[in-house]
Image (tube, helix red, strand yellow):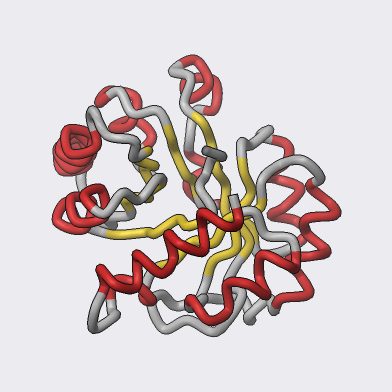
Amino acid sequence: MPYPDPFYPVVDSIKWVERLTKLGVGTIQLRAKELDDAGALQIVSDALAVTKGTPTKLVVNDYWRAAIVAGAEHLHLGQEDLTEADLAEIRKAKLTLGISTHDDAELATALAAKPDYVALGPIFFTTLKSMRFEPQGIPKITEWKKRIGSIPLVAIGGIKFEHAAEIFAAGADSIAVVSDVTQNPDPDARVRQWLGLSAEAA
């Protein structure tokens, strides 16, 4: 399978990692905020224990030190995290690296770090986190993909299953999904929908 998978849920707890792993999700990002070093190492270690021996790839958001110590293989950094991270140590640990981008300057910063994928967001308005950036819109996906070429492009921000076909058609290789899963009245059924579409997109 490609990395990241076309369907790329982002969750904030071990319970969600367990649930999605059991459903056969190929790539899961663990994004748990406001943890100290010990807390970060604990949750990353626990999540890796859940995915061990399964086809699921765990992507650690932000906590690059914990990712290295716990033996993770995949890392995602926002722009602020990127400025504080030791890229040499990350590469030495052979972690794949995904980077968030929102504008031209951030894309240049991301590309300089030679990422394994670039995330663009928010595509649509999102209530999950306060954003200083306006929604990018679907045409921006096509523009970004032309600029980054063979590097996988992940679209994120307010995306629901009903938008997926159009977003893949615009050039996204993967769609990161948060609320469409975690706030859905029937998350398991929604995940199965995404996995069906994901198999077609792969």
Residue 101 lies in quadrant? bottom right
Report the residue at 45% width, 55% height from top.
8
In this rendering, the answer to whether 177 lies above or below 173 is: below
Residue 157: x %, y % from top left: 52, 72
Residue 18 in view of the camera: yes
Task: Classify residue 3 as left or right of residue 67.
Answer: right
In this rendering, the answer to whether 139 lies above or below 196 is: below
Residue 9 lies in quadrant? bottom left
Residue 57: x %, y % from top left: 37, 38
Residue 54 lies in quadrant? top left
Report the residue at 40% width, 45% height from top.
26
Residue 158 in view of the camera: no
Report the residue at 57% width, 57% height from top.
200
- Most distant residue in the top direction: 92
The answer to which of 46 and 192 lies nearer the viewer is 192
Residue 70: x %, y % from top left: 25, 26
Residue 117: x %, y % from top left: 62, 43
In this rendering, the answer to whether 101 lies above or below 36 is: below
The answer to which of 52 and 115 lies nearer the viewer is 52
The answer to which of 23 and 17 lies nearer the viewer is 23
